[in-house]
């Protein structure tokens, strides 16, 4: 196998939740591998620096407003993305939220807030993206960012754990339904990576104590997520389909 199989030159990648955290890092990593980037978030202004950075490095990128929980917004975002760069053949479903609450205290609003973004959002973006690929007779790769909490339980995270478990199993079914269209679907289950969503907690003594219990005794670096994403997106992973790939420093085995 040639290392050229890892190249994403000529590919177009749409990444949700690209304004910060994992999505921002994934967008930069895929651009470095040669992909044209369609960076999506609810607020386009938060994408401007990312797009400018990619363009300055010689890549192609555009910023598109998208609310993954709103189907009309998703459809409009695809229309804009296709008009600017073409049909994306790599889709990274990264947008996600959390609302930690004990199960007894989690109300319907909290549940729906998390499920609408973490599950319905993945459904909306993946389904519309797959339809556009099929219409264009374009093979592709869809990567859903799940979580190690798709396979682990954590107190106070009922809505988040349920949403990510749903994404993991949806990935399995999608891989079967889309296989005949040459669209592969996989999920990644990240462990703990330092992001805007969790940085306040990990700066506390409780957060530092938790890190000390992890098998790796540290958090993951976003750069350590780029390789697995490129593998699943590229021809190097052409026979990987319907897989949940943990990138977690073995934390799932330590619960």
Image (spheres, rainbow, N blue to C red):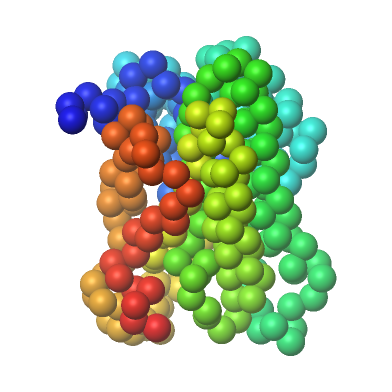
| Looking at the image, residue 151 lies above or below residue 166 | below
In the rendered image, which quarter contains the C terminus?
bottom left
Task: Name the foreground residue: 46 vs 155.
Answer: 155
Residue at left 56%, top 31%? 180
In the rendered image, which quarter contains the N terminus?
top left
Q: Is residue 106 left or right of residue 33?
A: right
Residue furthest to the left in view is: 2
Is any part of residue 209 visible from this angle? yes
Residue at left 55%, top 52%? 172
Q: Is residue 101 left or right of residue 224?
A: right
Res. 202 image quadrant:
bottom left
Q: Is residue 44 left or right of residue 60?
A: right
Q: Position of residue 194 (x, y in %)?
A: 38, 61
Q: Position of residue 60 (x, y in %)?
A: 42, 17
Res. 210 image quadrant:
bottom left
Q: Is residue 130 left or right of residue 244?
A: right
| Looking at the image, residue 243 lies above or below residue 64 | below
Q: Position of residue 251 (x, y in %)?
A: 34, 73
Count of marks placed on residues: 0
Residue furthest to the front in view is: 180
């Amino acid at each position: 196998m040639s290392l050229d199989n890892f190249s994403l030159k000529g590919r177009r990648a749409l990444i949700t939740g690209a304004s910060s955290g994992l999505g921002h890092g994934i967008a930069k990593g895929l651009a470095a591998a040669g992909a044209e980037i369609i960076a999506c978030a609810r607020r386009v202004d938060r994408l401007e620096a990312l797009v400018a950075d990619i363009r300055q490095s010689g890549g192609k990128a555009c910023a598109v407003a998208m609310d993954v929980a709103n189907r009309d917004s998703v459809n409009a975002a695809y229309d804009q993305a296709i008009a600017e760069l073409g049909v994306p053949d790599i889709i990274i479903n990264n947008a996600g939220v959390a609302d930690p609450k004990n199960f007894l205290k989690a109300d319907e609003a909290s549940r729906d807030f998390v499920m609408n973004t973490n599950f319905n959002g993945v459904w909306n973006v993946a389904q519309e993206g797959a339809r556009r690929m099929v219409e264009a007779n374009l093979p592709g790769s869809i990567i859903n960012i799940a979580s190690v909490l798709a396979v682990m339980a954590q107190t106070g995270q009922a809505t988040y754990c349920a949403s990510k478990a749903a994404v993991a199993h949806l990935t399995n079914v999608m891989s079967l339904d889309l296989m005949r269209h040459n669209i592969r679907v996989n999920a990644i289950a990240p462990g703990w990576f330092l992001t805007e969503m969790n940085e306040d907690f990990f700066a506390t003594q409780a957060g530092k104590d938790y890190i000390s219990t992890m098998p790796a005794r540290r958090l993951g670096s976003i750069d350590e997520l780029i390789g697995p994403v490129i593998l699943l997106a590229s021809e190097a992973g052409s026979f990987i389909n319907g897989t949940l790939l943990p990138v977690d420093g073995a934390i799932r085995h330590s619960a």
